[in-house]
Amino acid sequence: MLSKKGAGFIGEYEHSLDEKKRVSLPKSFRATLGKKVVMTRGLDNCLFVYSRSAWEKVAEKLQSLSFVNPDTRGFNRFMLSGAAEVEVDGAGRILIPEHQKAFAGLKKNVVFAGVSDRVEVWDAIRWHSYKTRIEKQADALAEKLGEIGAL
């Protein structure tokens, strides 16, 4: 959940798609995300979920980049054309658009991972594989971040 100090979304939660292909948002994320969220293709074949206000900031940043650069155009198309506004129903569930499920390879079990200003949605098997790989690299990643002054 986002705190007033801006700690952001944190934690990971595993949920299952129901028979109608809906999934419950973790309760701790719902209040901050609101009744309508913006979901888009993310990096590493996951989905990014933003509150409307956080999405507006992301979209503004993307729109401020020069469209003459082909990489900028490509990334804007990737993020913006893949986005969809998704309603959270009274039970806290969302229906993930089919094109996004296909992109992220979502099957039955999904993981919601809180990553500061966004929530990521992963296929559970893909998440566990990714997490295992990153955990093995954590020391080297921390060293690289320390070298550039990020830690």
Image: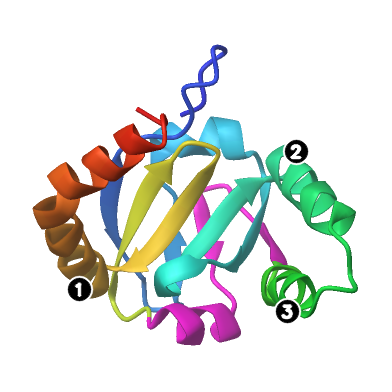
**Residue under label 3:** 74
- Occupied quadrant, residue 6: top right
Asked whether, in this view, residue 128 is left or right of residue 88, the answer is left
Task: Estimate the spatial distance between the alpha carbons at disc 3 and disc 2, rounded to whole Å.
Answer: 24 Å
**Residue under label 2:** 53
Is residue 19 shown above or below 72? below
Scheme of colours in the image = rainbow
Choose mark 3 or mark 2, whichever is in front: 3
Picture quarter with the C terminus: top left
Which structural element holds mark 1? helix
Label 3 Cα neighbours within 10 Å, binned few <14 / some 14-19 / many ≥20: few
Choose mark 1 or mark 3, whichever is in front: 3
- Of residues 33 and 144, which is closer to you in this image? 144
Which structural element holds mark 3? helix
What segment is highlighted magenta in the picture?
84-105
- Mark sitting earlier along the chain (3/2): 2
Task: Estimate the spatial distance between the alpha carbons at disc 1 and disc 3, rounded to whole Å.
Answer: 28 Å
**Which residue is painted at 78% across and 57% down in the image?**
62
Whether residue 149 is in magenta: the answer is no
